[in-house]
Image (cartoon, grey):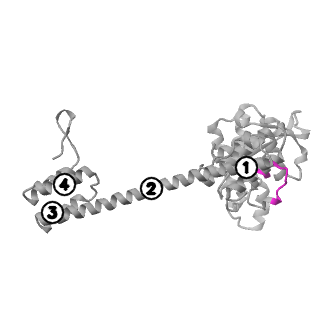
Amino acid sequence: MDHDAAHKYIYALREVVADLLRLVIPDWVDELDLTSLEDLSSEFFDDEHRKRAGDMVWRACFRDGTLGNGEQSCLLVLIEFQSTVDRNMAKRMREYTDLLLERLVRRGVVKREGGLPWVLPIVVYNGSERWTAPGEASELAPLPSARVERDLMPLQPQRYRRLDAGARSPDDWPAENRVAATVRLQRSGSSRELLLARLREEMERFPGAENEAFRRALYAWAKALEADRTGGGLELPSFDEMERAEGVEMATLLEANLNRWDARVRAEIRAEIRAEIQAETTERERVEEGRRLGRQAALKFDAQTAERLSVLLEGMTVREDLDRVSDWIIECATGEELLSRVSALRAPARTGPGGNVASRA
């Protein structure tokens, strides 16, 4: 599972989206019935539409309040995942919001005459740099004066909310918040030991069968982070092994997996070194053989023949071909005859009549 897929796997859980809302709208999140959270992403949007209208869409109802037609008043939560800073994010979120509402009206999920639902756009950002993009579309272009700004600003789209994984220290995030757990795991450092230890620690914060789905999602998130850091070389203990192991057993399990990974990496490095040494040895032997054949040609023929032969021998690595050249130096009566044979040897095989490959000289 890749990084992006693991992220969406986590945010497909109702309790994770609830914890996200607790982080981004702490002042009025209690006015929402978080048990009413419903994922609209897969039910109302196909893959192609989600590419044009945000990554995920959830709906939550307000505890009190109805529309004029008696329907429950709800909030649409539009979530977009970002790993890089996009200066046009506000414009994109405005477009996503418009597309989302239009799609819901066409599908009959909401009725335009009954009042469109409120939309809360949220950008979940986990990039390494701090987020610096404007928070609303109106900031993308400067206004000519303060008077114009006062008049136009209320008419512009609302600012989107943002969760920035790097905005504060890992220890400053709420301990029992699931979104905070993913942030702490992401910022556990480059050490493999720290990543695995943090994974176990975060899994222990959410015990019980009711949290198993989240623990599995957190495990998938750790696998994606590990793949980013090591190229996928480190094999984590299985989820079931992580669940069963405790205390010393867990430490032993982590150490065993790390040792297996280290041993495999060391073996791969040794194999690469051997291959490089073999390549260097082959090249060195070829150069030495070419010099030897050049000396033989100079002794039998002349220096000019030896020089031209050296050029023809460049890149010739097949042992049998070099042995053949050595025999020809003895057999050939003239330098031109020798050079003609070597030139033919180096020439690409030619296709003869009937598609057969003609033999080389």
Q: Which mark is residue 252?
A: 1
The quadrant holding residue 229 is: bottom right
At mark 2, the secondary structure is helix
For the residue marked with disc 4, what is the amino acid? Answer: Val
For the residue marked with disc 2, what is the amino acid? Answer: Arg
Is tag 4's residue or tag 1's residue first in the polypeptide sequence? 1
At mark 4, the secondary structure is helix
Identify residue for label 4. 325
| Real-space CA distance between mark 3 and mark 2, rounded to the nearest whole angstrom | 34 Å
**Looking at this view, is 100 or 266 the one in front?**
266
Is tag 4's residue or tag 3's residue first in the polypeptide sequence? 3
Image coordinates for residue 9, horizontal then vertical, percent:
71, 41
CB within 8 Å, label 2 to label 1: no
CB within 8 Å, label 3 to label 2: no
**Looking at this view, is 86 or 254 the one in front?**
254
Identify residue for label 3. 297
Which corner quadrant holds the N terminus? top right
Within-10-Å neighbours for mark 2: few <14, some 14–19, many 20+ = few
For this orientation, the residue located farthest to the left is: 333
For the residue marked with disc 1, what is the amino acid? Answer: Thr
